[in-house]
Image (spheres, rainbow, N blue to C red):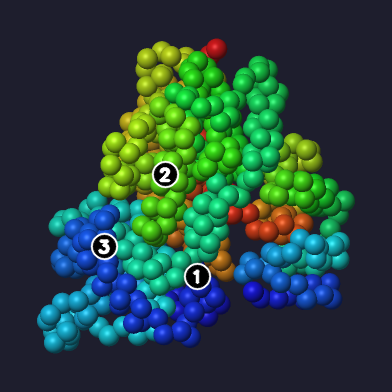
Amino acid sequence: MRRVLDEYRAISDEVLKPHEKRVPRFLEAMKKSLDSRANWTFWLPYVLSLDTCMKCGTCAEVCPVYLSSGRREIYHPAVRADALRKIYRRYFTLAGRLFPWLVGGEELTEEKLDALVEGSYRCTVCRRCAYVCPVAIDNGLLIREARKILDAIDIAPDELREKGTRKQLEMGNATGTPTPAFMDIVEFLAEEIQDTRGYKIEIPVDKRGAEYLVMHNAGDYLAFAETVMGAAEIFHAAGVDWTLNSPATGINDVVNYGVFFSDVEFEKVLRAQVKTCIDLKIRTLVVGECGHAFEAFKYLMMRLIPEEERPFEVKSILELIDQWIREGRIKVDPRKNPEPVTYHDACKLGRLGGLYEEPRRILKACCMDFREMQPNREMSYCCGGGSGFAIMTKGDFLKFRMETYGKIKARQVEETGAGIVALACSNCKGQFREIINYYKLPVRFAGISELVANALVL
Amino acid sequence: MPKMVLAGIEIEVDEDGFIQDPDKWNEAVAKALAETEGVTELTEDHWKVINYLREYYLKFGIAPMIRKLCKDTGFTLKQIYDLFPSGPAKGACKIAGLPKPTGCV
């Protein structure tokens, strides 16, 4: 593919439309993004981050892409975000409009727009940089705002929009699983549990009024079934009133790729998910092992939908499992997981969601030999699957994921000596599958639910 | 939509080379698609996976679960990667003429 920023391309020319005049539309959309009434998510940190970077470079010292690339300037977090700042200064500040050269304002050209698009997709918005910034600038947030502006002018990865949010709204899930296929899957899962564990459990589907609706990332059924089976075994063992839901009830996929690139898409998906929960009259929505869905339901939803319009609680499956182990509602025996296990903090669950201790308490209760990866928690490195990257594979993009984020992660995993990497996010699982394959690591990954189910004492 | 000449016929493919109309698929097309994935020879084991994927897709409108694929064909995931180096989704599904799997898979 044509080179626009570096040797990779995340977005094809078919979506980029380099021969159209896009700059005026971009500036119009950016103008709107700067209006607090038209940008409901993070307007204040957005404009502060545009205004205030001191160029101290602290962010670069923690950015996995910058560090692993041998400190390439184009991957410096402040430089990456500056693509947007330069436009802001040139077109949206008084000084910049009059004397752009004085304030570092720069004319936007079609070529620079191409580079801005690709630059916005060289960062997983892991926000490790934001965590260390001495003046609380969030360069990751600026990347998301850039992606939002681009989405407004129809530039978005088709994996995330056409085949992501749009498909989810049409089919009930982004995988395009129709209801008969979903029922076949659930039947197969119950058989598998019987074959592997030797006992039969019922997996309820579409049960109205259930206390817990467990909504998984629909991709988990197809690619990471052990996570879904583990969750079913745990809910069965806890003896609670629970259900899964089929696409016949609305949305049965907890993902919301709008989190990655678009508030417009985000809102459509979230409202459809909330409607499904209300129609099913469930009491608690349990977010399966999916990082960004936790952000969507735990935090972003609060900014969009008033409390009285969402009459159900939201819990991560990690919060519930942790609670049930501590209460003694489910019993686990760590001897059933004797192999050394390490845990990778998903950015959206940890740095963004604050779930640090829950997965650790769970793993320590369920595994004999739990080992921390270094660094971890707030300073955990993104695996490289974040913000949709795990499902973006155009051209050589997989190589970008492996040679940057993946390289650091592979080394971290090796240093623990663990045989199993525990993960609680579907995008992390997708990325680790590739990392393990690419670097030939002698390890396997497992969902937290799978390890808990292994350890269950019935 | 780009077009590719596969086994002598012009077929619409997406940007990743997945054919768009499953009806255009036949064994010769599968062989041509296999070459684009670096699979030079389709053995009996390859066909077992390809035929299973196709039958499931025609029945349910989606690719099967990876776990089910492994169980029903008797191959481990590693063996499937050995047969189709780019994996069950990007490799095997493409050769079987399925659309590219979507969502977090």
The residue singled out by tag 3 in the image is: A38
* Amino acid type at image mark 2: Ala
Q: Nearer the viewer, residue A394 or A378?
A: A394
Above/below status of A107 relative to A252 = below
**Residue at (35, 85) in percent of width and height:** A109
Tell me the mark number nearer the camera, choosing from 3 and 1: 3
Q: Earlier in the sequence, mark 3 or mark 1?
A: 1
Residue at the image position 53 percent from the left and 51 percent from the top: A168
- Give whichever of A210, A227 is nearer the camera: A210
What chain does mark 2 sit on?
Answer: A
| Residue A336, numbered circle | none
Q: Work out whether mark 2 precedes mark 3 in sequence or the reverse, and give the earlier one.
A: 3
Q: Is residue A202 left or right of residue B76?
A: left
Q: Quadrant of residue A77?
A: bottom left
- The residue that mark 1 highlights is A11
User: Which one is in front in this view, the residue at disc 2 or the one at disc 3?
Assistant: 3
Q: CA distance from mark 2 to mark 1?
A: 24 Å
- Judged from the image, the secondary structure of the residue bearing numbered disc 1 is loop
Q: Is the residue marked by circle 1 packed among few (<14), some (14-19), or many (20+) residues within 10 Å?
A: many
Q: Which residue: 43% across, 35% down?
A: A278
The reply to whether dot 3 and dot 1 touch (C-beta < 8 Å) is: no
Residue that carries the numbered disc 2 in the rendered image? A293
- Amino acid marked by disc 3: Ala
Q: Is residue A450 visible?
A: no
Assess disc 2: are there few (<14), some (14-19) or many (≥20) residues with their C-alpha within 10 Å of its C-alpha. Answer: many
Mark 3: secondary structure: helix
Q: What is the x, y in percent for residue A164?
A: 52, 56
Look at the image and tell me whether residue A30 can be seen.
yes
**Structural distance between the alpha carbons of marks 3 and 1:** 27 Å
